[in-house]
Image (spheres, coloured by chain):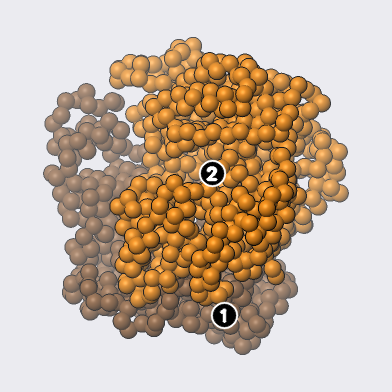
Amino acid sequence: MAGLRIGFDIGGTFTDLVLYDEASGRIHSHKLATTARSPEAAVRAGWRTLLAEAGFSGSQVSNAIHGTTLITNCLVERKGAVTLLLATQGFSDVLDTQREMRYDIYDLHAPQVEHLVPRPLRFEARERMDAFGGVIEELSVASLGDIAKRLERAGVTDSVESIAVCFLHAFTNPEHERKAGAWLSERLPHLRVSLSHEVAPEIREYERMSTTVCNAYVQPLAATYLRQLGEVLREVGFEREMFLMLSSGGVSTLETAAKFPIRLVESGPAAGALAAVFYGELLDLPDLVSFDMGGTTAKMCLIKDGQPAMSDHFEIARVHRFKRGSGLPVRVPAIELIEIGAGGGSVARVDELGLLKVGPDSAGADPGPACYGLGGDAPTVTDADLLLGYLDPGFFLGGRMILDRAAAETAMAGLADRMGLTVTETAHGIFRVVNENMISATRVHVAERGADPRSLRLMAFGGAGPVHAYEIARALKMQGFVCPASAGVTSALGFLTAPPAFEFARTHMERLNASSLIELDGIYAGLEVEGRRVLQSAGIADDDMTFTLKADLRHVGQGHEISVTLPCTRPSDMSLDGDLRPYFFARYEEIYGHAHTHLDLEITTCRLNASGPRPQVVLPEFAAGSGPDQALKGSRPAYFTEAGDFVDTPVYDRYLLGRGSTVRGPAIVEERESTAVVGPRGSAEIDRFGNLVVTLAE
Amino acid sequence: MTTTDPFAETPDFDPVSLEIQWQRLISIMDEIDFATVKTSFSTIVGESRDFACILVDQNGDSLCQSRFSPPNFCVVLPRTARRLLAVHPLETLREGDVLCTNDPWIGTGHLPDYILLTPVFHQGKPVAFMGTVAHLSDVGGHRGDIEAYDVFTEGIRIPPSKLFIEGEPNEFLFEVIGNNCRVPNLVLGDIRAIAGTHQIGIRRLRDFMDDYAMPDLVELSSVIHGRSESLMRSRIEALPDGEFEFGLDIDGYVDIVHLHATVRIQGNDIHVDYGGTSAQTRKGSINCAYNTTFASTMYPFKCSLVPQIPNNQGLFRPIHVTAPKGCILNCDDGLPVQARAKVTNNINQVLFGAVWPILGEHAQAGSGSIWPFSVHGDLEGYGSFSVSCLPHGGRGAMQGLDGMPPIAFPHNSSVTPIEIMETQAPILILHKEFRPDSAGAGRQRGGIGQRMTFRNIADSTIQGRVRPDKMFCAPPGLDGGVPGVVGEVRWNGRNIDRFPPLDLQPGDEIELLMPGGGGFGPVVERSTEHIRRDLEAGFISEAAARRDYGWDGPSEASTG
């Protein structure tokens, strides 16, 4: 049966839907305002419109995948459930003492990172495991009884909705957590229970506790919301099981998502990275950097060999949005995106040293940049882009908004005076500084993963991405950049290309010797059984399952490990000295430039990635259409760094540039959602799918 | 603050290019910082982050540091660099050379801090240095660290040397270092890892200079230093001129030590003199080489006056520090220095004690200090182990801000996870929790302290080291705030106040009761609402609320 697939994403502002009809290869999309109070309302309306437009009924849809920012927002706005923590006796204050590290070493006023469970709601159980999973003290059920009593005495029994259980070394021996979980489910059945060995089975108690608490905190909301969503989909006629997009870029069943909602936390941005993977495949570009620049932030993600960079830890709900260490650590597999405070709305100012700073403060959408004419008087990146000639005041968002050039100039003049520069120098200064912020972040992100920017291209999305892509690619000496066709639905396309994929992990700390590889076989086999079960429940046939083995390895004695994909189907297929060690040293050297080949290896965590087949999306080929001459709309002066001045630059209509059209820089290519700026060293071509592919000359 | 242009005297520069170039230098150091954590071998570097990455210009002046680097290391490194260059002059250095020393009087004041300095060659000329200061796991010496008679007892001292010569390891030196410590794998592993990160930094810096067609960093360095110095001077200028004095008794492991500071604000300079401070001592290994005193003096001024400006040499030029030769803050070569942090961690408290009236919201009462402990031994199942943990007491209150719960101050480091310690050493941590009623009362309460206990679970003796602070002299309050409650250490339930290496028998337990921070402002000004909240959280007991704050609320407010 030819499939009909729908991906839908509830963002903070908009709910996006995209429908792909495998039979015809056609893609339909729809965008409507998010209904914050009851998000399922926009989903219902969106599905109905989309199905009507495409001429299908809900029952014909074979596959639905959903992503959401609601979980993230719930954490950022701290609007989750009243949550309890149950920890090993003597350790519940770890939630406050954390790692005892300051995220800003000179700001004496930098506020403490407050976690989500206040001290009066933290409980302790008498129990103890040692580091190797041996029981030192049995779990005392009597000590649990105290919880119910204390809740009752405080009169909060009914308002409490969720509990996180985190015992020391539970990732090694989860028995006490399981017992406590069973006891809680029986005695306090209205509580949702999150167990640390299930949520984040990894060493380091604060990070595991933090992850478990975050999961518990969002679980009641996620459960309600997912249930309502399921009802709405049945209302519109969808009869199959819905999948949820995970921050790892895989998808999961509703059941798993309801149990571990923390794994959904970065699902929106993950979809963006997957879309870049998809376009990369289409263009035969396995190595690239996805670059999504919107109003407030820019997000970058390295994709190497068609795989996005992954991380098993990140932070959410930061006190200072862009300061590392100021948030709540979360340990779940996630596509690793770096996010910095650089967007169209980023505000420029002069700091106390007289230097030009751009962001991370953003004017947002309201009042927005000065040129929006909504009362904003601070100069922003969009104002600079307008004054440099990159944006057409009459064709912003396809003409839906008229930009006020005079307002941008006035805002810019104030800043220019303070620096003793001209308005143009100031606008160009903002452009350079915001670009450098993104360039530095990208350079470090790419280098930390052992890639060379010179072999990469940028995949530019978002309203401001294509405006700034040229300068970033140029500074990093990249080969060029790509502005994908139909930018409006790019991110939602990522949902349709996500395979069902789940990661399973087990901490196993051991210095490796020849016989340990056989022992590891058993661990991975156990993980595979789990994976097979979950994939089967998602309706995947045995033949379509792929299991990838990964291991967190390090040199003996080292404090941190790197995660490597094992080139085998079971560890004992390799020999330790002949295969695994050289393989690890090579990976290590790739990242850090040297390895300690005289040392033994230590494993800390076994990971297994279980995935189903990746759904294919075949884009329709783009019509030949007209050439550059017909697409030429006119010209305007635009400022180019290489020229050091304004250059009269031709402006093209993206929709009239047919397949195979080539345009030499400097040039500006306009479409509804964005404007691509091609500098003097670039030349752009429209490929057979309608993507704008820009190559930079040496 | 002054309204005149602080930069009238400094050279012209382009506010856009300087911003871009400066940020990029910082991001280079962040990258090598990240690589250091990821490639290190010891918990003290990898988990506790007791290291700093600093970019130094061709003169040995610091240009920038990674964002997380402990502040004091960055102030000292330039002084070290100049001494290294005096021995190995710039013109004799070759590409691939790496200089190193751990001399306390040249470096950061005690032997475990190794300093590695790698020249960066660009177009055939040395243009800068990658610098790292890292506290390594062991330097040999006696097994204790606070009962040494002299520095020679404390371990091996490496004079300014070449660790690598034109890219080749100086095997002799590696062997000397390895043969003189108990955990050569950790120490040499960390040293090699650090040298490796410098190579990353060198590549990045060269790319940077190529991108901007810079033959050297002379001009950029002079602008960064000039702007920073001017801003610092304008901030000092805005403070009222005057002389402020403060004396403070502090723990000294054996004898109480008196610190005394006279701070003179004059125009746009600050002069700090430590006359009146106790003489150097053979007891407790707590003497400070001048470098560390100098660095610790900079820190509170940096935080109070220019917290947002990236750290660099220019900021320190207007601050002048003198300490009588032979006093504990300017000790003679040869004196024992291992535990000098005992003293330097208190310098900010003496300075805030002197100048708080003119710093307004930027002064901070005394903090509960750092309480390092470690265990060592060699046992089947664990191998040769050496695991450290750096927990803290509560932080001091500020005008308008309660003190924070245990967090690093004035240095920065992170506490080793319990699960990591228990995996690497045969110890069981019985609890790590707040210590109620430990915080100093005040309009703003000090930060609450904490309690940790560990037990030897091996069936043989292991060695423990404990370095407590503020067991006799409490963290001072400011502006009428009450001092925090002093700390205590118990060995199998009995208080101890002497800290040689402890031979811990199987089952032995060490309990650490870490102090709370000092309060700020008169106790009577604390709001009832805040007292109620502290009761609810269990930070203070009802008895203490009644005693310390005159609380007369109903007793059910306490959750017990």
Q: Secondary structure at mark 2?
A: strand
Residue A261 left/right relative to A383: right
* Mark 1: secondary structure: loop
Chain B on-screen colour? brown
Which mark is in front, 1 or 2? 1
> Where B5 sits versus A414, above or below?
below
Residue occupying the point 62% across, 51% down: A656
Q: Which mark is residue A652?
A: none
Kind of residue at badge 2: Phe
* Image quarter of residue A98: top left
A196 relative to B508, above or below? above
Is A142 or A426 nearer to us in this picture?
Answer: A426
For residue B263, say whether it is visible: yes
Q: In which image quadrant can residue A82 be found? A: top left
Q: Who is closer to the viewer here, B357 or A271?
A: A271
Residue that sits furthest to the top in the current view:
A186
User: Residue B118, how many percent across, how many down?
Assistant: 61, 74
Report the amino acid beneath label 1.
Met
| Relative image position of residue B299 (x, y in whole percent) | 36, 65
Residue at mark 1: B214
**Chain with orange colouring:** A
For the N terminus of chain B, the quadrant is bottom left
